[in-house]
Image (spheres, helix red, strand yellow):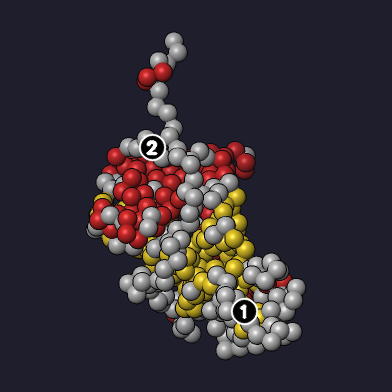
Amino acid sequence: MATAPHDVRTIEADSLPGRFARGWHCLGLAREFTDGKPHTVHAFGQKLVVWASADGTLNVLDAYCRHMGGDLSRGTVEGDDVACPFHNWRWGGDGRCRGIPYARRVPLRARTAAYPTLQQDGLLFVWNDPEGNPPPESVTIPRIEGATSDRWTDWSWYSIRIDGANCREIVDNVVDMAHFFYVHYSFPTYFENIFEGHTATQIMKGVAREDVRRPQAEGSGAPKVLGQTSVASYHGPSFMIDELTYHYDDGDVRSVLINCHYPVSEDSFVLQYGILMEKAPHLGGAAEEVAEKMGEFIKIGFEQDVEIWKHKARIDNPLLCEEDGPVYQLRRWYEQFYVDAAEVRPEMTDRFEFEIDTTKPNAAWRAEIEQNIARQDVAAQDGSA
């Protein structure tokens, strides 16, 4: 018998937002833009130009020259300015035209769109605000432990462009406990969310799945991963700092995982993630190698996420069970970045806490792991017979 139409839950989805989130967005490692050349970045539905002034300050402008539309990102850097390849108009980091070699004077209205920037911990951030306001002093990116310390590794950094998906898909993961088991091979034993102001935090403790091989633990004499403790916070709409401690059988290793993105268009974005690792004594000289292998393992998880995002439907009315976490509350927090500052409501920023009862999921997942191990044992016996 066909299901009656009124018994079918339909998927609801509004059109994609027509604006890009207000906040700091990380464009990547600062050193990638300091080679004395202008660089092209596609972000916020526009083409941008990024270059370093003589003193190392990084600048971001709309890439198209307001004179005759030349592409500044295909020009040259002249001292502190970027020069248009079309007529050599010189533009400063504040958006003002600094000179026209063949003209007696610069037009008074020779201004272009400039973006506020922040260089911190080896990273470049750009501020986006559809209303054109500067970043408030209260909206900051915390300093990252280890980013400027010799006792930590250098950045291992990865970047991938994702087409056919909106930024909200990745932010939803903040509350999605279950996908960590099925996608990222982690067995969550504790899961809590805290939202307040412009920060959304996920606290998770987990143990390693015995039925999954973990690349960073492979190799003769390599330590075995037992589990991890994670405190991951989005500071604004797109930059997450995850203080991640891996528990090995020979000791703990502290690391920092950055999970960040910036929008290219309404349905595409660049996903970036970076890893720093403390050079724990028991790692000896292998810290850089362990960090690299960890990055490769995390890369696998992100790639699985990407495949899901590419093929899933956008859904504004997800059907949830008790263990799915505060999806609607997270989206209400996230909405603050897509409305004018005057329209931010208290329910978007008031403190909210939610802890998931992991009793039922843990029992189900433990049974699944044991079944998988039993199947692997049988397969191994059949293979050696």
Q: Quadrant of residue 361?
A: top left
What residue is disc 1 on?
107
Q: Please name the residue shown 60% across and 38% down the image.
A: 382
**Position above or below: 287 against 378:** below
Q: Please name the residue shown 57% across and 61% down the image.
A: 43
Query: Which residue extends farthest top?
Result: 1
Q: Quadrant of the N terminus?
A: top left
Q: In the rendered image, is residue 258 in sight? A: no
| Secondary structure at numbered mark 1 | loop
Residue 123 vs residue 360, the one in the foreground: 123
Say which mark, if any, is on residue 317: 2
The percent position of residue 355, horizontal first and vertical second, equals: 26, 51
Q: Please name the residue shown 32% across and 37% down the image.
A: 321
| Secondary structure at numbered mark 2 | loop
10 Å crowding of disc 1: few (<14), some (14-19), many (20+): few
Structural distance between the alpha carbons of marks 1 and 2: 52 Å
Between label 1 and label 2, give the one nearer the viewer. Answer: 1
Q: In the rendered image, is residue 5 in sight? A: yes
Q: Is residue 361 left or right of residue 67?
A: left
Residue 141 vs residue 372, the one in the foreground: 141
Q: Quadrant of residue 265?
A: bottom right
The percent position of residue 280, horizontal first and vertical second, equals: 44, 77
Type of amino acid at the residue the image marks with label 2: Asn
Q: Quadrant of residue 385?
A: top right
Q: Is residue 288 left or right of residue 315?
A: right
Residue 118 vs residue 282, the one in the foreground: 118
Type of amino acid at the residue the image marks with label 1: Pro
10 Å crowding of disc 2: few (<14), some (14-19), many (20+): few
**Position above or below: 379 against 341:** above
